[in-house]
Image (cartoon, rainbow, N blue to C red):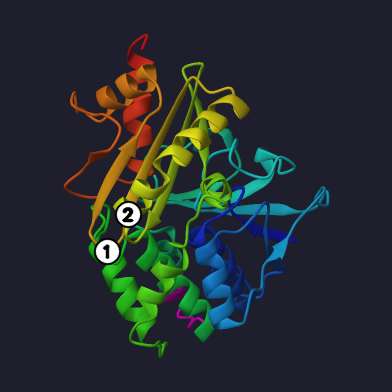
Amino acid sequence: MIIVTSYICPDLDGIACSIAYTELLKGLGKEVKATYYGDLGLEVNFVKKFTNRFPVERHHGTYGPDDDFILVDTADPDAIEPTIPPEKVIEIFDHRQLVFIDKFINSKNKIELVGSCATLITEEFQKNNLKPSASTATYLYSAIISNTINFKNSVTTQRDKDAVKWLESFLSLPNDYIKQMFGSKSTITANNLYQVLNQDFAVKTISNKKVGIAQIEIVNLEAMLNKLGNELTMVLKRFKKENSLDYVFFTGIDIFEGYNVFYTIDTESNNLFAKALGNPNLKTGYKTDSIVMRKQIWPKLESVLNGSNT
């Protein structure tokens, strides 16, 4: 059996790619299924409810000895389900600059810097002359729109736009679908702030330093931060303690207005991220002119931490 899966607590891109690549491989006569591990975010649940279809299983425990694995939207052995042996991974699709493909010695890798991994999977349908089902096309379309922030993200490529145009030929969505989807993950309160941030909280060890980055993408970002700034500080402190972090950072993205707001809770973290982002004026509440995604920040941190004793 081939298992298609993504990282722990996958976002919409990881789930969409898992569902879609499984459908593609079944169309090619493969014995395959999609799984995920951990919790799902508000945006995934929105598309799940909209399509009324969710052909991916939540997994617990161990896999079978004859199972092989395909990873989508990740190439990090520390980010995947711990029961997956890296040597059993046979294929990887990812769109990040910071990857660890050397850890997967038996995999065929497609790592290309597009805005969304769903773009790579969409192109696989085109290469194989296969048409996705309407629900699968909805997942892929939604993931590309989400990851590129409706093409406002600087990582957007023409390939992402072309993939969306092709997928639209299989869809009939409400005119306000994108607004509905983005709005679905923007209902954040003091009661669910920790849960929302923890669902997509990422930790990496770089040069023996543990770094955590929390990222959210919502509408009306500044209003939320003005209301929940104190709670955000407490959540970041909790993350730092629970994960034994050396550095912790928050980046919020306003998906309609197209900017970030950064938060730090200590001088060490602020200095590190200021250096990595090339911004000596970085401080809590700093607002950017354009969107910076977390996957763009990791390589900059790696360069700083591997090149200095910060």
Going from N to C along the chain, the mark reached first, 1 or 2, is 2
Q: Is residue 174 above or below residue 111?
A: below
Q: Amino acid at mark 1?
A: Phe
Residue drawn 41% across the image and 76% down it: 180
* Residue 231, magenta (yes or no): no
Counting from the top left corner in percent of width and height, residue 17 is at: 52, 64
Counting from the top left corner in percent of width and height, residue 27 is at: 60, 78
Counting from the top left corner in percent of width and height, residue 113 is at: 33, 50
* Residue 127, magenta (yes or no): yes
Is residue 133 something one can see in this rendering? no
Counting from the top left corner in percent of width and height, residue 9 is at: 60, 51
Q: Are marks 1 and 2 in contact (CB under 8 Å)?
A: no
Identify the mark at residue 99; answer none if there is no mark: none
Task: Describe the element under mark 1 as helix, strand or loop.
Answer: loop
Q: Is residue 243 above or below residue 83?
A: above
Q: Quadrant of residue 33?
A: bottom right
Q: Could you tell me how many numbered marks the image carries?
A: 2
Residue drawn 40% across the image and 90% down it: 172
Residue drawn 39% across the image and 80% down it: 177
Of residues 143 and 290, the one nearer the viewer is 290
Residues packed near mark 1 inside 10 Å, few (<14), some (14 to 19) or many (20 plus):
some
Residues packed near mark 2 inside 10 Å, few (<14), some (14 to 19) or many (20 plus):
few
Q: Write down the residue under mark 1.
A: 256
Q: Amino acid at mark 2?
A: Ala
Residue drawn 75% across the image and 61% down it: 1
Is residue 49 something one can see in this rendering? yes
Q: Write down the residue under mark 2.
A: 223
Q: Which residues are magenta?
A: 123-132
